[in-house]
Structures are given as structure tokens and as C-alpha cells.
Amino acid sequence: MTPDLTITTTHTVAATHSIVGILLAAGVGQRFDPTAQRFKLTQRLESGETVITCSARKLRAAVDQMVIVHGPRSVESWAQTCELDAAQLSCPQAVAGMGASLKAAVLAVPPPTTGWLIALADMPFIDPLTYQSVVEALHGGAALVRPCYANQPGHPVAVHRDKLADLIALDDATGAQTLFKRYRETIHWVPSYDPGCIQDIDVPADLIQR
């Protein structure tokens, strides 16, 4: 079933782009603050930027077009990204899981000619060079791309346009994880010296880059 989408942007989304960036920002961050008073995506880093703004800025620099998927706390996250050159997407189905957010983003704009670069809004410490390396591998024809740091899979990940049908068919709860498991033998691993590609913001102490 096609999800109900509410998309707002001050920029055109009619054209087909080579690479579309998808920033998944629909989580509520319950572990960060169980009382829900502090939303992790709007907390400030040592640089002064908020978590979501930093993540969005880096992703936007690496792609031709960007879609930001907001969830239950969209009023807060939207306010941090409304000035960016990006499509802002409210996804009511986000509560079902990351797969629902990802499918909504894929369906929100025309399919890219090359593929999608998918990033998590709570991972602001990824080095721009990591984004660049993943994009280069995607342009090189890889079907699935993922960085690897110290033998650990990282982010962002990239998916070739040929996998469009697989993306739309993803399970709401598990998301792209299922896709990468199914085609694990075809993954193009990008060796990385960037610890930021495996560091997410889970608790307040994570706001300091390791």
C-alpha cells in the first residue's frame, strides 16, 4: 500500500537527479531522554550546530537532491532544517519503523538516474570524505555500497536505482538492513579511517565526538 505523504519544499522536485540523498530523521530518541523533554536531533554539538542540521548539511553537499523524512516530532526537527535546499517530508507511518520512512522518501520524488545515498540524522560526525567515497562507488556501478571502519559496517549507505523495486518492498520495521542482508555478496565495501561513520547519538554523552 502506498503510504500517505505530506511533502513540502520551496525547491523543485520535478526533475530527475543523478543521486538523491535521504536523511532519516523520524525517530523520537527515547533512549536519549526517556522523559521526552530533550529531543536528541535538536541538541547542540560542540560546534554549535544541532545534530540534525550538521547531518543534513553534510549529506546535502554530497548529493544532487535531498529528502528529509520527519516523524512524530516533526515540528521540532522541521524547524532545524526548513532553510535547507531539501524536500521536507512528514511521514505518519514512521512509527512503524525505519523501513516505512525510507519507502516514503523513495516514493516522494522521481527516481534518480544513479541511486540513493541514505544517511541517519543522528550520525553528525561522518567525515565528508566518507560521503564522497560512497558516492564515487555508486557512480562506479556498485549496486549496494557501505563504508567499513575497524571491521564494523558504517553509514551512509548507497543503493543503485536498479534496486528500486526492492526498496519499495522493504519491511516497515527493519528497513534497508533486510536489503543489505539479501544481497550481502554484492555489497561494495569502502574501507574507511573515519570513526564518525559508526558513531551515532544514542545518549547525551554521545554529543561529544570520539
Image (spheres, rainbow, N blue to C red):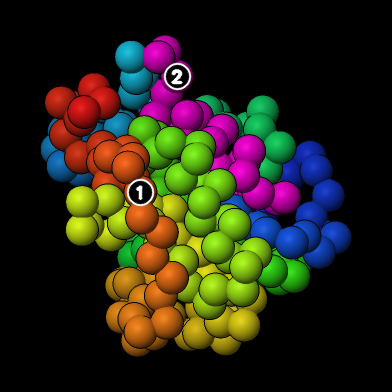
**Where does label 1 land, which residue?**
192
Q: Is residue 48 magenta?
A: yes
- Give the residue type that dot 1 points to: Ser
- Mark seen at residue 120: none
Quarter of the image for residue 180 reads bottom left
Q: Secondary structure at mark 1?
A: loop
Quick one: quadrant of the C terminus?
A: top left
On screen, residue 144 above or below 25: below
- In this rendering, position of residue 71 left or right of residue 151: right
Quarter of the image for residue 50 reads top left
- In this rendering, position of residue 43 left or right of residue 205: right
Q: Secondary structure at mark 2?
A: loop
Q: Residues within 10 Å of mark 2 (few under 14, many from 20)?
A: some
Q: Residue at x 50, y 40 (%)?
A: 129
Q: Nearer the viewer, residue 39 or 133?
A: 133
**Distance Cα–Cα, label 2 vs label 1:** 24 Å
Residue 119 spot, x, y in % from top left? 45, 51
Q: Nearer the viewer, residue 138 or 205?
A: 138
Q: Nearer the viewer, mark 2 or mark 1?
A: 1
On screen, residue 143 above or below 207: below
Q: Nearer the viewer, residue 45 or 198?
A: 198
Residue 125 seen in the current view? yes
Q: Residue at x 35, y 84 (%)?
A: 185
Q: Nearer the viewer, residue 107 or 111?
A: 111
Q: Indicate which disc, 2 or 1, sits on the residue closer to the N terminus.
A: 2
Q: Residue at x 58, y 65 (%)?
A: 138
State the extent of the magenta-drawn residues as a range: 47-67
Residue 134 spot, x, y in % from top left? 51, 56
- Mark seen at residue 49: 2
- Give the residue type that dot 2 points to: Glu
Residue 116 spot, x, y in % from top left? 59, 63
